[in-house]
Amino acid sequence: MNSNKLKDSTVLVTGGAGFVGSYIVEKLLPFEPAKIFIIDNMIRGSHRNMEHFINHSLVEFYEDDIRNGQLMDDLMSQSDYCFHLAALRINRCAENQPEAFDVMVKATFDLIELARKHQIKKLIYSSTASVYGLSQHFPTPETDNSYDNKTFYGAAKVFGESILRSYHDMHGLNYVALRYFNIYGPRMDTEGKYTEVMIKWLDCIRDDRAPLIFGDGSTSMDFVYVEDVADANIAALLNDVTDEVFNIGCQVETSLKELLELLLKINDSDLQPEHRPENTVNPVSRRLADISKAKEMLNFEPKVSLEEGLKQLSKWYLELHKEKTEHF
Ligand SMILES: NC(=O)c1ccc[n+]([C@@H]2O[C@H](COP(=O)([O-])OP(=O)(O)OC[C@H]3O[C@@H](n4cnc5c(N)ncnc54)[C@H](O)[C@@H]3O)[C@@H](O)[C@H]2O)c1
């Protein structure tokens, strides 16, 4: 691992005002790059996410769209490295496929083509466990195929990964793709339409309302703390590894029922959950990453336990949202 690679280099972070991207920017600064460009159209990103670095002399923020080809060409022409995170959420992709195509597929292709044109030294691509659909094996290795994925979002991420492979093969473009499992932590989405279940449960804890579990609560996820994900991104850039894809999770399977129990315990709550029938068809009932490849090749080691991470999340969220929310 060469930790001097970043010194005096220029780094472009797409989606840098978002949840994961803002932590990556924070972790880049101590390496003393010459410049960090952030491009984010703020459909989900926020100035609050960037409060620790927005006024930093090394950071240049562009409130703009990755579909702005002229600007992307200009930023890429000045960059050594790129972290590509800008993306739509899974539900939004399902709701508006033409938009999803433009952002997730077309703009990602254009970005990869610019990376080739301007000979970017390395591109780190944010992919997802959604590419697997319901995996064939648990823990799931990177070699499980993506045939079960039925989502536009997952399909678009497979496209990005595959085009990067082909560009490595045809043009020698260096890249690493990271398949994140279920990321959580301070700055995760709390307002939007797609708020995660743990935020809804934190609202219940604050308001002293019974948290709802839809279905039997056996659906499982592999939760990974946001700072561990940001560290994985930095390691993917610094290590001399290229043309590889890595699972980024904790290799710990947690059911929704267990998640709620832990959240209640951490917040000293004795609320009893209410069970309701499953209201949506959940195509993926299990998630558990095999992270041995990332451990071996990136020295990736998740540092934050679910209990510790949920404490951080609870503290941040309950401080920010002290007021009760109205429920009708
Ligand atoms: N959060 C997770 O659990 C998770 C899991 C798997 C993969 N991922 C992937 O990780 C990456 C980061 O996710 P996140 O949770 O930080 O999401 P996020 O929504 O917080 O961040 C994405 C950022 O991209 C910006 N953006 C969206 N479309 C844009 C466009 N056209 N032009 C410019 N900016 C645009 C948004 O405003 C947002 O700030 C994404 O690629 C996502 O698909 C996230």
Image (spheres, helix red, strand yellow):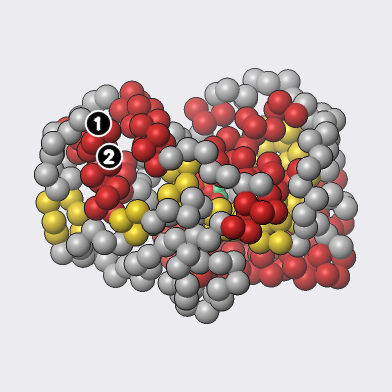
Classify the position of the C terminus by image quarter.
Answer: top left
Residue marked by disc 1: 267
Q: Are marks 1 and 2 in contact (CB under 8 Å)?
A: yes
Q: Position of residue 224 (x, y in %)?
A: 47, 47
Residue at image point 85% right, 30% down: 8
The x, y position of residue 40, in whole percent, is: 61, 41
Q: Is residue 326 left or right of residue 247?
A: left
Q: Quadrant of the N terminus?
A: top right
Residue at image location 67% in from the left, 37% down from the top:
38
Q: Quadrant of residue 55?
A: top right
Q: Is mark 2 within 8 Å of ligand 1?
A: no
- Residue drawn at point x = 58 percent, y = 23 percent: 52
Residue 185 image label: none
Q: Position of residue 235 (x, y in %)?
A: 69, 44
Residue wearing tag 2: 263
Pick the residue in front: 262 or 83: 262
For label 1, the crowd category at 10 Å Cα-Cα, with few meaning under 14, some 14 to 19 and many 20 or more, is some
> Which three-letter amino acid code belongs to the residue tagged 1?
Asn
The residue under label 2 is which amino acid type?
Leu
Residue 189 visible? The answer is no
The image quarter containing residue 168 is bottom right
- C-alpha distance separating marks 1 and 2: 6 Å
**Secondary structure found at label 2:** helix
Compared with 82, 278 (above or below) is below
